[in-house]
Amino acid sequence: MSREGVEHALRARADERDRISGDLLDLESHTTYQLLKGASLRGATAHRWAGLQEALARLWGLNDAYRAVLRDAEQIRDSRGRLGSDQLEQLTGLLAGPSVVLRAAAKPVEQRSLLPQADERLTLDQAVTRMDAAFREVTSALTDIDARWNDLLPRLDAADAALRRVRAMEADLGEAAPGLGQADAELGRLRADVVEDPLGASAEPDLDRVSRLLAAAVAELELAVTVKQEYARRRENLMAALDRVRAAESEARLAHGAVVVKIALPPQAQPRSRVDALADALDALDVSADTWVLRAKRLAGLEDDADAAARQAQTTARALYGLVGRRDELRGRLGACQVMAVRKGLAEDPAAADLYERARALLWSAPCDLTAAAAAVETYQRAIHGGEA
């Protein structure tokens, strides 16, 4: 190599050495690497970590040998101001030849031979290639482990936070959420599995199940806490809602009484009261020994039932009054058909007159059979229009 070639090669190798050193320092400070160094590993992760340790040993051994060659080359270059042919020959051997010496590794006695073990010699480029392969093996393992931890540990943290929330609400209510007696131990076991063997842990199914249980428990307990805090106010509101049900049911009964004398109604049209049953359920809730979780559900159910009962009574009253309106609408249609019959000269027609009288008798009878009356008006209308409704 020429003097210029040597200088260029040394500068390039120095830059390469600095870059490799930076990468190795980053590896040493990597969070997952630091955690693994201090962790008690087992299973698939322990096996992968053992292979990673072997790769690290190769990496550092190669790096030491590589740096030693560069130190020797820099010492030769710095030994004199102008390099002679001997120095250039030495530097060419170091920078371009198989100058990186890897000492034969000590083997267990059962794998040894009495013959000397040959050292391996590599060029600087070959040493860098091997270091890169070992580095990639290490970072691949760290990436796989890191991905598992990044996926599972936040979910475990969220489950732990939900469990703490559950325990705090249990203390506030003085009662335990059902089905979570072993949640603390189960989450502890899952966390140990994930921390000690992230590559082999199959925590997802159990973690999903526990997370769902905790989410349901948090929702139930939050409702129970709210009910406990607002029970007096919500009870007053429910009493007011029952008064509205009484008023709506009273209106429905009045509507039935007013309509039944005008319109023939079936027995099932008689409005049925639900307010007494709802009031009894509220009284029973006051003295109930249920947990606040169950009481919250029952109170919410009563509130929904009271609203539904009021709406049903109001709907019944409107429907009953609507029957009178239907009768009046049929009377109007019958009158309009009679006018049309006069215009067409059919007013004196015996058949048409009979149909009119039958419909009129039905509509002006009390109570009126609306179904029969509607059919009679329809028949009369078809007769007036020549068979078309």
Image (tube, rainbow, N blue to C red):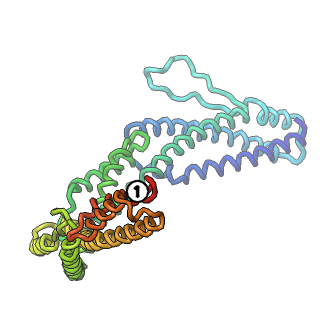
Q: Out of 194 and 381, give the one closest to the viewer.
A: 381
Quadrant of the image for the C terminus? bottom left
Amino acid beneath label 1: Ala
Say whether residue 142 is left or right of residue 123. Answer: left
Residue in view at x 69 percent, y 30 percent: 122
Reading the image, the residue beneath label 1 is 383
Question: Looking at the picture, how far across and down is residue 334, in whole percent?
Answer: 37, 67
Question: Looking at the picture, how far across and down is residue 5, in whole percent?
Answer: 88, 40
Q: Out of 382 and 38, give the one closest to the viewer.
A: 382
Residue in view at x 19 percent, y 73 percent: 261
Circle 1: is it few (<14), some (14-19), or many (20+) Cα within 10 Å?
Answer: some
Evaluate whether residue 235 shows in this view. Answer: no
Quarter of image, res 143: top right
Q: Out of 227 and 143, give the one closest to the viewer.
A: 227
Question: Looking at the picture, how far across and down is residue 164, in whole percent?
Answer: 30, 64
Residue in view at x 57 percent, y 36 percent: 58
Say whether residue 326 is left or right of residue 287. Answer: right
Q: Secondary structure at mark 1?
A: helix
Evaluate whether residue 343 shows in this view. Answer: yes
Question: Looking at the picture, how far across and down is residue 217, in whole percent?
Answer: 28, 61
Q: Out of 114 and 177, give the one closest to the viewer.
A: 177
Number of numbered discs visible in the structure rendering: 1
Q: Is residue 151 above or below residue 87?
A: below
Quarter of image, res 260: bottom left
Quadrant of the image for the N terminus? top right
Say whether residue 160 is left or right of residue 294. Answer: right
